[in-house]
Image (cartoon, grey):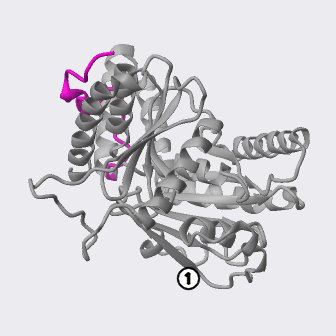
Amino acid sequence: MHTLFNPNILSPSPAPAPQPNPFDLLLRTNSHTLRTSSISAAISASSSYGSCTEYALLTRQQDDQLSESNERPTEPRPYVRRKGHPKILLMGQRRSGKSSIQNVICNKMAPAETLYLESTNTLQTASINSFTEITFSELPSHIPASSPEIATPQNYASLGAVLWLIDIQDEYLSTLPSLIQTALFFHTHYPRLHFSVLVHKTDGLSPEYRNEAYREIRQRVQDELSDAGIPEYEIAFYQTSIFDLSIFDAMSKILQGLIPQLPALEALLTRLCSACGMQKAYLFDTASKLYVATDSGPAVLKDYEVCADYVDLIVDIKALYGWQLEAKGRRKSDENGEENIGESVVTFEKSGEAYVYAREITEHLSLICIMGKGSTPDKRVLIDYNVSLLQDAVVEIFKM
């Protein structure tokens, strides 16, 4: 076990600026420029062929290409990089669970109480105010994504991700045409949006049926996209349910794609696990149980469930005995001017070798780690030192 000797690992070196390819053709030019370049190419070709007939043939081919390019429809306006906090749009068929997900994640509603929610008829929005504001919007099933009232720059230009929900316990094949139309719309007008499909309500189904339906949905969607001419369009698929932590795990992965600081956070957590012999490390949003980042090691749902339950315990204890916050939501400082940092350790094996380590990073972020057999509690001094370096780095990262 060693220390994080180099703090620069928290800020990966920026990627080099892409160099222009001199062999790429500039398609977005006016007719005069294109015609001039075409004639120049024809002249250079004619000098190599040495034949006036071949020169004339090449010129006619260039003119035909020019006329075809002018007859093509105008391409959509390029997607502008979104600014501000993460925004997620929920879509899908009626009674697919959009309102339930929004209330469970944002409003902490018990999953059983969502059975009495009414259908949504208008665009509904809910937010989580944490380390950043996370907005969830729900679009009713009878309103298509391309509706003029909804498809406005105010609604879509700042979106980060679109989630399409499929009720696996219903006739899920009937929703695939609407799913494909929506995917084609966002691919055409907002190609940089993250598009994901949630195969929802998987609770109560046998693993064989659930996995078979999941594979069928995924294969049909990919086939339809290939037939539409966009096989390269990347769509993420998740199996979710509000009655377990699979919905929080899927939302965490979707949220990570909307956080620009993710590469630096992953490098930081990976280095911490390597230095301290940790099995897994999660950086949690304490209020919502969504993890903002994790190390590069393989993620196991069981590990996440243990850490998420620990976060629930921390929130409950915090409400009873924990951190005293100022009216503005900031932590108080002690007499020496240092902030009070909350931390705890829980051992969940009789041997005491494997345990969960929790450390408050900021008011809204918590580090939850599953310690391996090599990181015994007697090495807590070195572990605390490394985690303090991580804490300082995380605070600086989110200040950028």
Residue 374 vertical position relative to residue 346 in the rendered view, above or below = above
Count of picture labels: 1
Q: Quadrant of residue 115?
A: bottom right
Return the residue found at the far front: 350
Name the image quarter holding the N terminus. top left
Q: Residue at x 38, y 63 (%)?
A: 130
Tell me the quarter of the picture where residue 21 sits: top left
Q: Residue at x 56, y 72 (%)?
A: 107
SS for dot 1: loop
Q: Is residue 18 visible?
A: no
Q: In the shown orientation, is residue 123 left or right of residue 265? A: right
**What residue type is disc 1 on?**
Glu
Residue designated by label 1: 149
- Of residue 288 and residue 101, the one placed in the foreground of this image is 288
| Closer to us: 28 or 256 | 256
Q: How busy is the neighbourhood of tag 1: few (under 14 within 10 Å), some, or many (20 plus)?
A: few
Q: Out of 119 and 180, give the one closest to the viewer.
A: 119
With 122 as the anchor, is 33 left or right in this view? left
Q: Give the residues drawn in magenta, as a range.
A: 1-30
Q: Residue 14 sits in which quadrant?
A: top left
Query: Does the stretch in magenta take in 20?
Result: yes
Q: Main secondary structure of the magenta part?
A: loop
- Residue 218 percent across, percent down from the top left: 76, 43
Magenta residue check for 205: no
